[in-house]
Image (cartoon, rainbow, N blue to C red):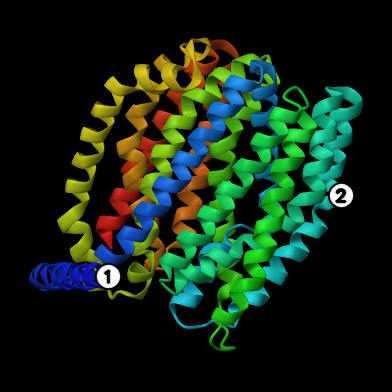
Amino acid sequence: MQYSNIMKKVRRKIYNLSKDIGDKIGIDLPYYVENGFWATIGQVIQIVVGILLSVVLARFTSEKILGQYNFLISILTIFSIISLPGINVSLLRSVARKKHGTYKKAVKFSFLWSLAGLPLTLLIGAYYYFYDEQIIGIGIFVAAIFSPLIFPFASWDSLYQGQSKFSISTYFNSIKTVIIAGFVSVSIFFGKDNLILIFISYLASNTFTNLLFYYLSFKHIKNDDIENSWKKSSYKLSLIAVISLIYDHADKIIIGVFFEPEKLAVYSIAVSIIIYLRTAIKMLIRVIMPKLFAADKELLQNILRKYIVKFFVVLILGSIVFYFLLPFVITILYSTKYENSVFYAQIYLISIPATGLVMFLQNYLIAFNSETLMIKVKLIFTVLNLLLYILLIPYFGIFGAVVSSIIYYYMLLFVFSYYAYKK
């Protein structure tokens, strides 16, 4: 009882202090302090569990299995394009505007699109099975079957994010991450050289958690109101999401096509650290997304002018710290057989400051309903990035992929900054 009273007093003091500071600088600081706590907890759990799973994969499977597993994960993620992934952002914005009836309609719409794309994914699996590598073909067949159940029903998180229920979102996402990691780890210990068993355990656990949390989310739907423009906006935002997905996974697919799986394993370990850093930044930015979407133009411009440069400096300083930590982190976690990953990860850190600002500016522009602008910009630069991948990866391997990614993010940063300040 005494402990509870102490915690209440501490929370009240933190609230009062953050409110006083927020009133002076013109933002709802208590909102960010409270929800930033949940975002931080969610980041820590997902990053820690993700690292532990990658350590298990790296230490208890061969470089070949790790490379093939990452190749299949990239193929599966590309399949999510068919489910119109931009629906999640459109849904988040609709829920933030109290249009909860959009939720079930959006999930059903995404599911039907996933089913429509099933024959295409099966054809890709058939190509690999008969003309390339049989084990990869089987993996793609399995991914094609599970993908309509994985991606559409993951929209439960957008409902909670739009309602600013970050504690629930963090709780369910943490459970999901732990369950998936647990199933994959168990499958590794029972059949460390059985790629299909490992991959099915990932797919099945992912499907189960999404379906469960989708069902549990129904009680949080407060009305049947539907935003009229959600479908049109979903198409536009899906183009943006497709462009991002292609960028995020084209490098692994191209490396997997041109080189042996062992090389893809080295690259995957190098970029995994960078991906965890991106995830941390992305989840922090997601905390402010409902506020951005609901804010007026003057407040948005005030936030941009006051904090964008400071945010960039913090990202640079963080990248410098990680540069010196990476040699110890990678060899301790993944063993010396992946020490070649250190060099590539250190170079890749150059992209982090630009990545963070691009994530923020993208949501800033979405708040201004600038989806069409972003589609054009990201489409142009993603095509340029893919050309760089195709030109550089076959000749320079992993180094070519890393350099291409760095160029891509700084080009986006320059263009997004230009249009954001024009607003």
Mark 1–mark 2 contact, CB under 8 Å? no
* Residue 364 seen in the current view: no
Residue at 50% over, 41% down? 49
Quadrant of image for the N terminus = bottom left
The location of residue 339, given as percent across then percent down, is: 46, 12
Q: Dot 2 corresponds to which residue? A: 119
**Quarter-wise, where is residue 2 in the image?**
bottom left
Residue at 47% over, 23% down? 270
The location of residue 419, given as percent across then percent down, is: 32, 54
Local crowd at mark 2 within 10 Å, few (<14), some, or many (≥20)? few
Examine the rendered structure and indicate whether residue 43 appears above or below residue 423. Answer: above
**Quarter-wise, where is residue 20 in the image?**
bottom left
Tell me the SS state at disc 2.
helix
Q: Dot 1 corresponds to which residue? A: 31
Between residues 134 and 355, which one lies in front from this camera angle? 134
Residue at 76% over, 27% down? 191
